[in-house]
Amino acid sequence: MAISTAAGTAHAVLVSPSTMRLSRALLVGALACAGNGCRCARASAGSPQPTGDASTRMDASRSRADAFPGAAEPAPAPFDFDEARQQETLAHAVFILCDDAVELGREELLLRIADYLLSREVDVAGRIPGSAGIYRRAGMTFRASAIWRANPPELEERRNIPPLAVPLESHGSSGYGLAFLCAARLAISTGEADRAASYLSAAIRHAVHLDAWAETSSVELMGEEHERRRYPEQIDYDSDRDGTLDPLGTPSEEVLGNAIADGYPFTAFFLAGLYAATGDPRWDEAARGILVDALSLLEPTVGGAGAIAIHFEGTPNPDLCRGTALVALLVSKMLGEVDLVFPAPVEVDFELAEREALVTRALPAIVAYFEQSAYRETFGEAEGCGWLQTDAGGLGGIAEYTASTWGGGSAGIAATLASVHENLADAASHDLARCAAEWVMAHAVPDAVLGGVRWLPVDAPCATCPDPRDPQAEELLTLEGLTVDGRSEEQGFTQASMCRGVAGVVGALAQVGERLEPREQGTRERLRQAVRGGVAWLRGAAEGVSSTDELGGYLLPRSNLDMPGGEDDRRSQNGGMQATPSAIQYLGMAERFFDAECLAGDQASCGARDEAHDLREGLFARLGTELDCQDAVDHMYDRTLRARARDCTPVPYPFEP
């Protein structure tokens, strides 16, 4: 397969109508924003300092005007957190919620987050060897920018590490870049061309920073030599830990790995998305170099006729978080599939011969691996497909167990194969996606406390699989903990979020039902029931921890059980600010599925559609009010979603003293 970087390639990528290429005029405006005096002013090379009056910061687009009693509705201003824990989570929320924000009229909330992130940018061009940190195009100059990672205060106190001393992670830069690309699209949708230009300029600066540290090499791929591109995992700008910038940054020896959130996929999606926004071939070539690297990691499977997979310590790894499904998704997205699994616009240019090689050789060989490695069981009238996790995937490196989850198990594989099917239109990927969905539906766990159904991070031992032995898995299957209504029950640990929780499973099943249109009516009805059950569980979890909250809306916990034990103890609310955007995104997928089923005549789906919409809207509104409270009252951002009184003071959850 040829992965050419020559000029003049044919533009044969299928692009969704939602993909928005910013005009060259807008690009010029964005480039102009790189100079002094631009409205997206960057901080100095030192640690960035927040600006603005916290007492005036409000979200004019929130649906509940009484979140701050007696307050007028001032013009929206950027968030201005005096302190921010895990601010990468804010960037992730922006690009995850991009489409939902437009639909629900919440654009300004995400733009306020983007404005805050702009205020944290630091010019690092002078800390990059040579001229790699400076990029000139169309008479304009871009200087590489970064955003320092923020540490929780207890980490700084315990280890005496100032924020500047923490090495920057390349995947974090990609996350910020994706957020700025989304913000540019949102600003265009609201008619703010100058604002869009400032965000696009920021995205380019982050891409310059990433690409400045890239390494290229020649690799043989399917009998031909090609250029691959690799990025260091981290860049250290304060190696002596004195709290000041070193003259030059130092890249780590480790390169970005094969991981959905902290590996090369986000970087590839960001650079390809930047090419979609600018048309600049530099970013197209960079994204394609990452694709070459990903394909070069695939190895033949033992005993498989033409099957290829990602291996971990010699064992094929199937999952979407770190395994073969992730490479399949990367290929599928770059071929043009837009909406499934990862909803951001991705665009690259292939020659027709290159496209044909990907469609006729690479993807079919990956599908052959899933076909070969599936463990098949009959559940009632349906056959389900599961895959064994390896130490590189699942929850906590649990090997030899199957999983129904999005990140480590059959749900994510089903959605990925549905994405592959959009490009191949073949029977094998269609039937495997359906089979994987049947496995997931057969492992749903009814929840008498919260209602609906949920899924565990690992499945009970598979009858046809090798005999598993893992104490951690057994604990997760039977863990006794505190539910959101204060009752202690032994019912297994469940999360609400995307990778290993109910939201991801709900979204994956909805996507399979919407796209593959299984021919069997029994499969279709099971999909409706499973997605309805998952939405009902998410609603029960959100309502269960909202009973003492006076701001209205819903609170989504990370899980319905504690993980008891010392420093690892996690109360149910922890992680809620991280779980909520994923739940909003995947509830939107469920809503679209139910809408199609409703139009097809299924009356139960009409009500389920409305329930999913109400929950999605309520979670988004509560996310906005929580950010307002954390900014204007707490003066800091962290990932905890708290029950609050009307003055934003935290109140106890139902199970707390």
Image: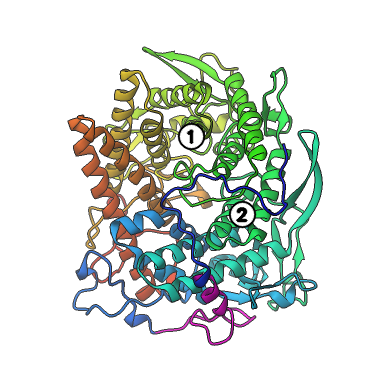
Specify whether 283 is left or right of 479. Answer: right
Is 366 situated above or below 101? above
| Residue 487 appears in the figure | no
Look at the image and say whether residue 608 sits in the magenta stretch: no
Question: 484 or 167, which lies in front?
Answer: 167
Residue located 73% across and 29% down the image: 314
Q: Which residues are magenta?
A: 26-52
Q: Closer to the camera: disc 1 or disc 2?
A: 1
Gap in angstroms between the C-alphas marked 1 and 2: 23 Å
Residue located 68% across and 51% down the image: 256
Q: Quadrant of the C terminus?
A: bottom left
Q: Residue 458 in the image: x percent, y percent?
A: 49, 31
Specify whether 526 is left or right of 183. Answer: left
Question: 631 or 222, which lies in front?
Answer: 222
Give me the disc on residue 267.
Answer: 2
Look at the image and say whether residue 44 sits in the magenta stretch: yes
Q: Are marks 1 and 2 in contact (CB under 8 Å)?
A: no
Q: Quadrant of residue 278?
A: bottom right
Is 190 situated above or below 42? above
* Mark 1, residue position: 422
Q: Under tag 2, what secondary structure?
A: helix
Is 1 situated above or below 59? above
Residue type at mark 1 is Glu
Residue type at mark 2 is Thr
Q: Under tag 1, what secondary structure?
A: helix
Q: Quadrant of residue 97?
A: bottom left
Q: Residue 447 in the image: x percent, y percent?
A: 30, 32
Q: Quadrant of the N terminus?
A: top right
